[in-house]
Structures are given as structure tokens and as C-alpha cells.
Image (spheres, rainbow, N blue to C red):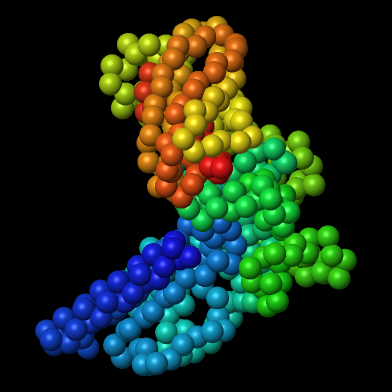
Amino acid sequence: RKELSHYYSSVRRADDCVGAILKALDESGQRDETMILFLSDHGMPLPFAKTQVYHHSSHTPMFWIVPGTTTANSSDETHLVSAVDLLPTLLEVTGIEHPGRMDGRSFAPLLRGETQDDRNFVIKEYNENAGGSRDPMRSIQTEQYLYIFNPWSNGERIMATATTGTPTYRRMAQLAKTDPWINARHDLYQHRVPEELYDMQNDPDCLNNLIDSQGHQPALNALRTRLDQWMVDTNDGMLDVFRHRDDPSVREAYVAAQEQEADARRNAGRGKGAKGGGNQPNAGNRPNARRRNNLIEFVLPEQISAGQPVTIQLKYSLTTAMGEQDLTVTLKAGNAGMRLDRQTVKISANGTFDMTFSIPAEVPNDTISFAAFVGPDFQHSLQHIQSEPQIIE
């Protein structure tokens, strides 16, 4: 509720800012000479929303005021448009010559209150987040259905998004330990399934996957066919994988190749920006800093008590080329992740290490968590991991 209240506060502040801009245009006498376009980002990073291709991931507001074209207080709830359509629309509205091929097309006729064919679906694409995690997805949504293809889903890979750092997700992960329904949702959020199908009219929150429903196979096949055509038209590199979507080995090979490409690109960038370059310890042997390196793993006790020391165990497995490395572990408190303590030890080869931390008598939100990384510092770490929030008894 608190995180949602912050979102509503942000919406209110955005509304105030828009009002101030419109007031300034009125006072300057430029209102009738100004085209206004208001767009939104994708809201709060709540589970099954931001960094996804669900309905709540992409359903955003869009307001236009085009003097001499749009009609005040009018709205269009029939046609579906997408971000790729914005540039060609702006070109047409402003009278700028279209430079040639674009994936989107102008919806200027809709601004004039007209109708437009083939506006009954939108395509959604996701490839990689800012942290370099490759979790490619393709989706098509109509007024009735939403179909999603997740080639990265193999039952083990966990999707990495910024959402996992929010209070709402942390609470979800916490409740998943005792609530079977939330546990199932949490598992789906982390691992997903290769294909999903939802009825947008009756299930906009995407709770009931209809992918195996016999009664929905005709609609499913139509969506797959339309998505396939879009991928052909846009020269989508995922087309062959999509056409072999029932073969786990094809899906896995594609995602592995994407991950390797991201690793190489990120490592190259890191080498250029790192102070000292190859003179850093083990610089030539340092793999990409990512959660999937599987160098370290937490083993946490079942119960942690306020005012009492807690001992945690870390399992580690380093290659010979990595030599001796620093292992840094941080104890954090509350939803904000306030640092309480940090310890660093030296590790090499394989083994386990116990660390003892003192838990304060009072802890914000009655939760703590642990974070750890291997390497000289966080920026140049071999791997970093974050535990789920732990409830203080």
C-alpha cells in the first residue's frame, strides 16, 4: 500500500506539472499554436508489470492536442497503437517527409476522429535490461487475448529485473514462504513458462494461463500466425526459435548465444572503463559480474532472532585461474536495505565459510537480508548475490 501511495503521489505531481505547463501556454497566448503530446512510462515496478510484456506492462496513457485536428474531450478506445507508431505519426502531423521504411505506421487519421484498418493488435518485444540480463520475450495482444513467448524459460533460469529490489516484491517473496497461492505466483514470476495465453476481457491481471485450453486453440493459432508474420516483416532474429518453440534445445541454444553476446559486450565495456585496465588483479581471468556465475551461495538459518547473533554459511567454488579473491558480505536491514555490517574474507578454490553477525534488538520492518560479492570491489566483482528478505522472530 505504501509503494502504491508513492505511485499515486507521483501521478498527482505529474498532473500538477502538466497543469502548470498548460497555464503557461494560456498566459503566453501560445496554446492554440502548440501541439501537445503527453506520454507515460510504465508506472511502478511491481511484479508482473514493469520489465514484462503483460497488459499492465504496456497499457499506458497517451494524450494529444493538435490544433485544428483533435477534438476536445474525445477519446479512442477502439484502435490499438504502439510506441513504434509515434515517429511516423509525428512526421505526418508536422508535415515532415517520411524517410522510408519504419516498423510503425502513422495513426494521424485517428487523431482526426477517423478509423483505420489493422489496428486490432499490437506487438510487444523485450530483449535485455539495463543490467545486461537476457530474457527475450515476444508477445501479441488484441482486444480479447494476450499471447507471450518466453524462450528463456527453462524451469531453472530466474528472470533478473529491477522489480526484485522493491518493497512489494520483497513482501511477495516473504509471503510466498507460507501462502501456497502466492508461492505459485512467485515461482511463475521467477521462472515463467515458454508460452502463455490470457483472456484480456475476463482476466486482465493474467492469472489463468489458457495455453493448454482446447477451446482456445483456434485463437492461439491465429495469434501465433500473426506474430510469425510480424517477425518475418521486421526481420526478427528470434523467428527461427519461435518456429521451433516446442524444442527446448533450440530455445536454450538461442538464449545461451544471446547471453554470450551480452557478456562479451559488457566485458569489453568494462575493460575500457576500468581504472588500471589489465593491471588489475586477475583482470584477464575475470568473468562477467552476473548472478549466474554460481561462484557463491548462501546457506541461511531457518530462524533469526532480534538481539541475537546469527551465523550464516557461504559455499564457494572458484577456478584455479581466479586465484585468491575477496568475499564481501553485507548485512542489511528493513525494506530500504540499510547497511548494518560488512565483513570481508579471503577465499580460494572450493569450500565453505561461516560468518557471524549481530542482529540489533530493533530492526526496521522486522526484516534483514544479506548481500555478497566476490572480487576487489562491487564494480569489478565476479559475482554478486542478494538473499530473500528474512523475517526477524
The correct choice, above or below, for 222 with respect to 116 in the image is above
Quarter of the image that includes the C terminus: top right
Task: State which quadrant residue 118 falls in.
Answer: bottom right
Q: Can you give x and y, in whole percent of width and height, for residue 95 in the image?
A: 31, 76
Q: Residue at x 46, y 87 (%)?
A: 75
The correct choice, above or below, for 294 with respect to 100 in the image is above
Q: Can you give x and y, in whole percent of width and height, for residue 290 in the image?
A: 51, 31
Q: Residue at x 49, y 11 (%)?
A: 347
Q: Nearer the viewer, residue 341 or 310?
A: 310
Whether residue 284 is visible to the viewer of this picture, yes or no, is no
Residue farthest left in this picture:
28
Q: Residue at x 31, y 27 (%)?
A: 273
Apparent side of residue 332 relative to residue 22 in the rendered image (left or right): right
In this rendering, the count of numbered labels is 0
Q: Nearer the viewer, residue 41 or 351?
A: 351
The correct choice, above or below, for 35 with respect to 52 in the image is below
Whether residue 110 is visible to the viewer of this picture, yes or no, is yes
